[in-house]
Image (cartoon, helix red, strand yellow):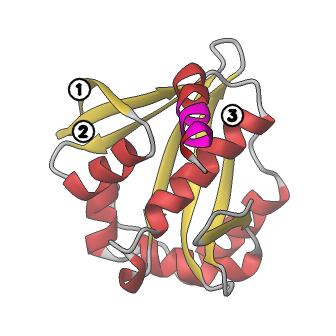
């Protein structure tokens, strides 16, 4: 999946070192409202390899690379519900030098385009920490709209969503605006 700044690709074993580094970084796990990873890298690598061999049908995790093929983060759609025709989206730009430079926006837009082009899903939703304005700006630029709030594990989240019909409408408007 190719965007204007990023390429989304299947995860591979060589991604494990970066993923481990990002999941043991206190700043990044705080942005994700997740606990700091405390297992050793060898244990992490065993679990990582098992996950690659046996992926969940309810989850698809992709690496985010620059167009020069530098692995800078990950994105995922998960909790895929075929009956409701919806899934949850997540993203993390792990490399600090690539934050606030449009890579996250391009990754989210590329993933949303892929989901609505290649699946029958009708709604993509997400939750972001209520204080994470950078993430909220990214999601708003990609067409997500706020749809509620929730408290989970002591964290306050803003809920956001995009529906297929809005995505299609915005795509048609962009096509009409091009010369």
Mark 2 — residue? 153
Q: Earlier in the sequence, mark 2 or mark 3?
A: 3
Quadrant in the rendering for residue 102 = bottom left
Classify residue 50 as left or right of residue 63.
Answer: right
Residue at mark 1 to residue at mark 3: CA–CA distance: 25 Å
In contact (CB < 8 Å): disc 2 and disc 3: no
Estimate the x, y position of residue 151 in percent, counting from the top left.
Answer: 21, 30
Badge 3 element: helix
Mark 3 — residue? 116
Q: Which residues are magenta?
A: 170-176
Estimate the x, y position of residue 4 in percent, counting from the top left.
Answer: 61, 67
Q: What secondary structure prevails in the magenta region?
A: helix
Quadrant in the rendering for residue 59 = top right
Badge 1 element: strand
Is the residue 120 above or below the residue 50 in the image?
above
Between label 1 and label 3, give the one nearer the viewer: 3
Residue at mark 2 to residue at mark 3: CA–CA distance: 31 Å
In contact (CB < 8 Å): disc 2 and disc 1: no
Estimate the x, y position of residue 74 in percent, counting from the top left.
Answer: 56, 64
User: Is residue 141 in the magenta section?
Assistant: no
**In percent of the image, x 33 and y 64: which residue is there?**
29
Mark seen at residue 149: 1
Q: Earlier in the sequence, mark 1 or mark 3?
A: 3
**In percent of the image, x 69 and y 12: which residue is there?**
83
**In percent of the image, x 52 and y 24: which residue is there?**
166
């Amino acid at each position: 999946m190719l965007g204007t700044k990023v390429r989304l690709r299947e995860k591979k074993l060589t991604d494990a070192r970066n993923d481990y580094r990002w999941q043991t970084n206190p700043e990044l796990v705080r942005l994700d409202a997740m606990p700091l990873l405390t297992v050793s890298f060898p244990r992490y690598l065993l679990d990582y390899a098992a996950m690659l061999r046996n992926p969940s049908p309810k989850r698809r995790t992709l690496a985010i690379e620059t167009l020069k093929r530098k692995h800078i983060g990950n994105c995922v759609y998960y909790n895929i519900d075929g009956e409701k025709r919806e899934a949850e989206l997540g993203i993390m730009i792990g490399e600090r030098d690539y934050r606030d430079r449009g890579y996250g926006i391009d990754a989210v837009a590329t993933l949303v385009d892929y989901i609505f082009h290649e699946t029958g899903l009708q709604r993509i939703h997400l939750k972001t920490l209520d204080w994470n304005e950078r993430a909220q700006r990214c999601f708003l630029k990609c067409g997500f709209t706020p749809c509620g709030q929730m408290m989970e594990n002591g964290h306050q989240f803003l809920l956001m969503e995009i529906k297929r019909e809005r995505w299609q409408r915005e795509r048609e408007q962009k096509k009409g605006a091009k010369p």
